[in-house]
Image (cartoon, helix red, strand yellow):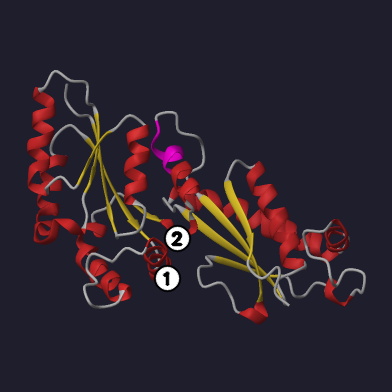
C-alpha cells in the first residue's frame, strides 16, 4: 500500500512540532520523529512494498539533523516527483515566546551551548531559513496555547476538518502602557466618552453590564463598531484566502479597562457568530 499523503513537520525548537506530531498521530498518520533526511525516500519506498495500510505519513525533521539539513531541498524535490500529496509545515514563534517556553520547561536550546537561548534561536532561524522558504504553510504558534494549536491542526488537516483556517486573537489594551507589538490590525476608541470619569463606573470594567450599557448607548460607538465590523468582514476572508494562520486585532483606549474591553468582547462575539475561531484577552484590565 503506497503512501498518498506525507506531512513534513519542521521548524524552530520550542515552536510546537512535538505537539503537532502527536496531533497528526491522533488523526491516523504514521508518525516518525527525527528520521534521517537521506532515509526518507527509502522509508517511503519500503512502506509501498509492505502489506500494511500506511497511507498517511508524518515526519518530524529539525535542527537535530545537523549538516544533513542542507540535503532537504534535494530530497523534497525527489519526493514531489512521486504521486504523493506532500505538505511541509514550518512551525515558528517570536523570540520572546521561545525564550519563555525554554525558561518554563528548563530545557537548554540545542544550539545555545554556553551562550543564551536568544543566541541559539538566532542561529537556528538562520540555519532553517532555506527550509522555511520551501514550506507550504508557516504556522506562527505564539498566539496559541496547546489546546488552541491542537484545535487549529484538527481544523486544517483532519479529514473531518471544520471550517475556518484562521485563528483570531482579539486584544484590548491601554495606550498609556504601550501598543501590543504583535498587532496586525489596531483600532482606537479613545474618541469615545470615557467611563473612567463617571463616578459610578470608574471602579468597574468593560466586562460589567453597567459599562457595556453606557458604551453601547453612545451613537458614535454604534457607528464606529459597524464600520470596524464591516471592514473585518471584508478583510478576514481575504486573509484566509492568502493562507494566514492567525490574526491579532488590537482595540485600544486610554487605560485598557473600559471602552476597549467592551468593544473587544462584542467584536469577538460577532466574529464567532460568523464561524471564526476567536480568543479575546484583556492585557491591561487590572492595571491602575
State the SS at label 2: helix
The N terminus, quarter of image: top left
State the SS at label 1: helix
Cα separation, mark 1 vs mark 2, equals 9 Å
Magenta region, residue range:
153-158
- Residue 160 shown left or right of residue 126 in the figure: right
Q: Determine whether 158 is above or below 211 in the image.
A: above
Query: Which numbered dot is residue 142?
Result: 2
Q: Determine whether 98 is above or below 118 in the image.
A: above
Magenta highlight on residue 35: no
- Residue 95 shown left or right of residue 216 in the figure: left
Residue shown at 63% from the left, 67% from the top: 283
Horizontal and vertical percent position of residue 63:
20, 59
- Residue 77 shown left or right of residue 259 in the figure: left
Pointers 1 and 2 in contact (C-beta within 8 Å): yes
Horizontal and vertical percent position of residue 198:
90, 74
The C terminus, quarter of image: bottom right
Which secondary structure is most common in the magenta stretch? helix
Res. 193 in view: no
Query: Which numbered dot is residue 96?
Result: 1
Q: Determine whether 32 is above or below 73 in the image.
A: above
Horizontal and vertical percent position of residue 110:
23, 64
Considering only order in the chain, which callout, 2 or 1, is on the residue closer to the N terminus?
1
Give residue 102's quadrant in the image.
bottom left
Residue shown at 16% from the left, 41% from the top: 80
Identify the residue at the far front of this view. Answer: 106
Tell me the crowding category of disc 2: few under 14, some 14 to 19, or many 20 or more residues within 10 angstroms, Cα based.
some
Horizontal and vertical percent position of residue 78:
10, 43
Residue nearer the viewer, 243 or 158: 158
Amino acid at each position: 500500500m503506497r503512501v498518498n499523503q506525507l506531512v513534513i513537520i519542521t521548524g524552530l525548537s520550542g515552536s510546537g512540532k512535538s505537539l503537532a506530531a502527536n496531533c497528526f498521530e491522533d488523526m491516523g498518520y504514521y508518525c516518525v520523529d527525527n528520521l534521517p533526511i537521506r532515509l526518507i525516500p527509502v522509508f517511503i519506498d519500503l512502506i509501498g512494498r509492505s502489506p500494511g495500510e500506511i497511507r498517511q505519513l508524518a515526519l518530524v525533521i529539525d535542527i537535530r539533523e545537523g549538516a544533513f539539513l542542507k540535503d532537504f531541498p534535494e530530497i523534497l524535490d525527489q519526493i514531489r516527483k512521486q504521486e504523493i500529496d506532500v505538505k511541509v509545515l514550518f512551525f515558528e514563534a517570536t523570540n520572546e515566546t521561545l525564550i519563555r517556553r525554554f525558561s518554563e520547561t528548563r530545557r537548554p536550546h540545542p544550539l545555545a551551548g554556553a551562550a543564551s537561548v536568544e543566541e541559539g534561536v538566532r542561529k537556528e532561524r538562520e540555519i532553517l531559513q532555506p527550509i522555511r522558504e520551501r514550506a507550504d504553510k508557516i504556522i506562527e504558534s505564539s498566539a496559541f496555547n496547546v489546546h488552541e494549536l491542537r484545535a487549529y491542526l484538527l481544523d486544517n488537516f483532519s479529514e473531518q476538518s471544520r471550517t475556518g483556517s484562521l485563528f483570531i486573537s482579539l486584544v484590548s489594551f491601554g495606550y498609556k502602557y504601550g501598543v501590543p507589538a504583535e498587532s496586525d490590525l489596531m483600532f482606537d476608541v479613545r474618541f469615545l466618552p470615557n467611563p473612567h470619569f463617571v463616578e459610578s463606573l470608574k471602579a468597574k470594567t468593560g466586562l460589567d453590564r453597567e459599562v457595556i450599557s453606557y458604551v453601547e448607548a453612545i451613537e458614535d460607538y454604534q457607528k464606529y463598531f459597524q464600520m470596524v465590523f464591516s471592514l473585518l468582514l471584508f478583510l478576514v476572508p481575504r486573509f484566509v484566502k492568502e493562507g494566514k494562520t492567525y490574526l491579532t486585532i488590537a482595540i485600544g483606549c486610554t487605560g485598557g479597562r473600559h471602552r476597549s474591553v467592551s468593544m473587544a468582547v462584542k467584536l469577538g462575539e460577532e466574529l464567532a457568530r460568523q464561524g471564526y475561531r476567536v480568543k479575546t484577552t484583556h492585557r491591561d484590565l487590572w492595571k491602575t
